[in-house]
Image (cartoon, rainbow, N blue to C red):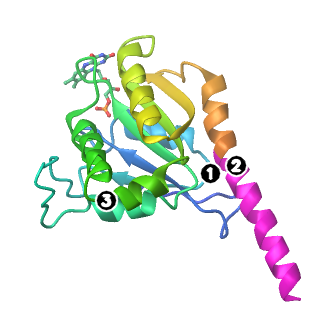
Amino acid sequence: MNTELTSSSTTCPTTAAPALAILGSARSEGNTARALQRLFENLPCEVVDLNQVRVAPFSYSQQYSDDDFIGMMERMVEAPLIVFATPVYWYSYSASMKQFIDRFTDLLYSRKDLGRRLRGRKVAFLTTGYAPQPNEVIQAAFSSFCDYLGLKQVGMVYAQEGAAFFDEGAVELVRAALRQTEDLKTVDERVESALLL
Ligand SMILES: Cc1cc2nc3c(=O)[nH]c(=O)nc-3n(C[C@H](O)[C@H](O)[C@H](O)COP(=O)(O)O)c2cc1C
């Protein structure tokens, strides 16, 4: 796993659980990686770069050797927020993101247990492209994917290459979702330590 891009929060340095971002771009330090860093500036986010892990194409046989997908999924079901980050390539997901998303089919076959744990998890979608406006086709596909798996969408963020975010309101929704989880965690920890006293 590539954790090089992991950043820590300055406000909740040790206790906050990081968001888990899946970066699916043909370049690991390109526009999408940069947009992701801007999105989570000063908030804890662990980035898994699909260029650095092994995610095999979906197989009906459900036989995968030497593959990181299930390990990633086990981290995902624990993450307070999951972010799918992809450039728009030919009006669609990047190839690595599509291959990754196809593997969620495993959760309907051999790993229904993980599929159940994934339900209700908070997710966000980040896309980048050359177009001034977000691509509605890819956003609709992502929404349908979330609906099917029972994922809770907190926001869709778009950045045109080299430009500011398209919709700052959506950016705030995503950041707020992560902060909210941190706040809840902090309250839990305060209650826990009070009970220990
Ligand atoms: C193969 C390819 C296809 C692309 N297709 C589109 C497209 O359909 N719509 C769009 O807005 N931008 C398109 N772009 C531009 C990229 O989405 C944009 O530059 C993006 O920010 C690149 O992110 P990256 O640096 O993470 O790869 C394409 C770029 C590439 C390389």
> Residue 174: in sight, yes or no?
yes
Which residue is identified by label 2?
179
Position above or below: 13 against 122? below
> Mark 3 vs mark 2: which is more N-terminal?
3
Please name the residue shown 69% across and 41% down the image: 176
The residue at the far bottom in this view is 197
Q: How far separated are the C-alphas under marks 1 and 3?
A: 31 Å
Which residue is identified by label 1?
43
Picture quadrant of residue 188: bottom right
Indicate the amino acid at tag 3. Answer: Arg
> Residue 1: in sight, yes or no?
no
Estimate how packed mark 1 is, as few (under 14), some (14 to 19) or many (20 or more) residues with alpha carbons within 10 Å. Answer: many
- Callout 1–callout 2 Cβ contact below 8 Å: yes
Please state the extent of the stretch shown in magenta in the rendering: 178-197
Q: Provide the secondary structure element on which disc 1 rests.
A: loop
Q: Which mark is residue 51?
A: none
Which residue is identified by label 3?
111
Q: Quadrant of the N terminus?
A: bottom left
Position above or below: 153 against 118? above
Estimate how packed mark 3 is, as few (under 14), some (14 to 19) or many (20 or more) residues with alpha carbons within 10 Å. Answer: some
The residue at the far top in this view is 132
Q: Provide the secondary structure element on which disc 2 rests.
A: helix
